[in-house]
Amino acid sequence: MMTRIAIYPGSFDPLTRGHEDIIRRSLAFADRVIVAVAVNSSKSPLFTVEERVDLLEAVFAGVEGVEIKSFSGLLAEFAQVHGASLVIRGLRAVSDFEYEFQMALMNRKLHSELETVFLTPDLNLTFLSSSLVREVASLGGDVGEFVHPKVEKALREKLSR
Ligand code: ADP
């Protein structure tokens, strides 16, 4: 039987309950989900790539079918190298649409067999973003509802420095 491999790329700076929701939903139709943490030089991240990968690994430890990797360069190439046929992206609002649509079409140009699948999270997670979590946490607000306890602890340690 064919193994269906999906790639879920993103910054994950940091991982939120929204990302977790999308990863779990992906497991309903993918045998393996590779969470691909982007090494993106154009953004200045709060957490290093290694820290973001470590957090994802800690949160998904023991969850079968989930693998964490970092990547730089073209997603289409990374997908090909790992035998992935699906790219997972989350859609929260209309504001996500234009960029996501462009990227999906470009990725198809670069790798014609790659399909992008858009998933919507649980309704109460649709307003959530990593940038909002970073902002609230940096101002001393409680983000316990929006991130895993391990992420909350990492945020506290990072921001107390
Ligand atoms: P990027 O820099 O690639 O947008 P993010 O880590 O912000 O990286 O997001 C990765 C993916 O997860 C994107 O497809 C984004 O739309 C999706 N995502 C982020 N937050 C949520 C959320 N709360 N619910 C659903 N999808 C989300």
Image (tube, rainbow, N blue to C red):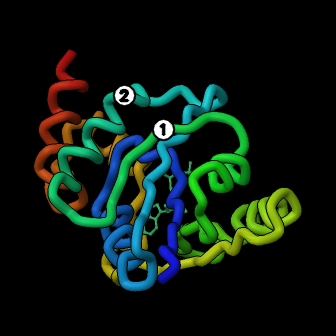
Residue shown at 48% from the left, 43% from the top: 37
* Image location of residue 161, percent across then percent down: 21, 15
* Image location of residue 30, percent across then percent down: 44, 77
User: The disc labelled 1 sits on which kind of residue?
Assistant: Ser
User: Is 114 or 22 nearer to us in this picture?
Assistant: 114
Q: Which mark is residue 50?
A: 2
Q: Are marks 1 and 2 in contact (CB under 8 Å)?
A: yes
- Residue on which the image places disc 1: 70
Q: Is residue 38 left or right of residue 147?
A: right
- First-in-chain label (1 vs 2): 2
Q: Quadrant of residue 112?
A: bottom right
User: The disc labelled 2 sits on which kind of residue?
Assistant: Glu
In the picture as drawn, the residue positioned furthest to the front comes out as 1
Would you say the beta carbon of the disc 1 residue lies within 8 angstroms of ligand 1?
A: no
User: Is 110 or 3 nearer to us in this picture?
Assistant: 3
Q: Is residue 55 left or right of residue 35?
A: left
User: Is 138 or 35 nearer to us in this picture?
Assistant: 35
Residue shown at 53% from the left, 60% from the top: 7
* Image location of residue 32, percent across then percent down: 41, 67
* Image location of residue 58, percent across then percent down: 18, 45
Residue shown at 76% from the left, 71% from the top: 113
